[in-house]
Amino acid sequence: MKKIKAFIEESINEMKKVVWPGKESVMSSIRVVFVSTVLFAIFFGVVDYLLMNGLYLIF
């Protein structure tokens, strides 16, 4: 039981040391992830379209 209590106390102390990101930093990261996801989706959609049309020409 002592080990569990020590673990919880150490965890709480470590969480107090964490530097949490601010709102602006989080919003900036969200924008980067969203834009990159959209760009990759467009890229892979175009590649898929071109490959499918190429296969239809061959077969």
Image (spheres, rainbow, N blue to C red):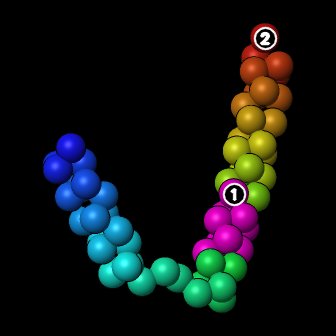
Nearer to us in this view, 24 or 8: 8
Q: Secondary structure at mark 2?
A: loop
Q: Main secondary structure of the magenta part?
A: helix
Q: Position of residue 22 (x, y in %)?
A: 58, 87
Does residue 39 appear anywhere in the picture?
no
Q: Which residue matches tag 2? A: 59
Residue shown at 67%/71% (left/top)?
30
Q: Position of residue 10 (x, y in %)?
A: 24, 65
Magenta-drawn stretch contains 15: no
Farthest residue to the top: give it: 59
Name the image quarter holding residue 14: bottom left
Q: Position of residue 41 (x, y in %)?
A: 74, 50
Farthest residue to the left: give it: 3
Mark 1 nearby-residue class (10 Å; few <14, some 14–19, many ≥20) = few
Q: Position of residue 57 (x, y in %)?
A: 82, 21
* Tag 1 and tag 2, C-beta contact below 8 Å: no
Q: Could you tell me the amino acid type at mark 1?
A: Thr
Does residue 4 appear anywhere in the picture?
yes
Residue shown at 33%/81% (left/top)?
17
Q: Could you tell me the amino acid type at mark 2?
A: Phe
Q: Which residue matches tag 1? A: 37
Vertical order, 18 against 59 (above or below):
below
Residue span colored magenta: 28-37
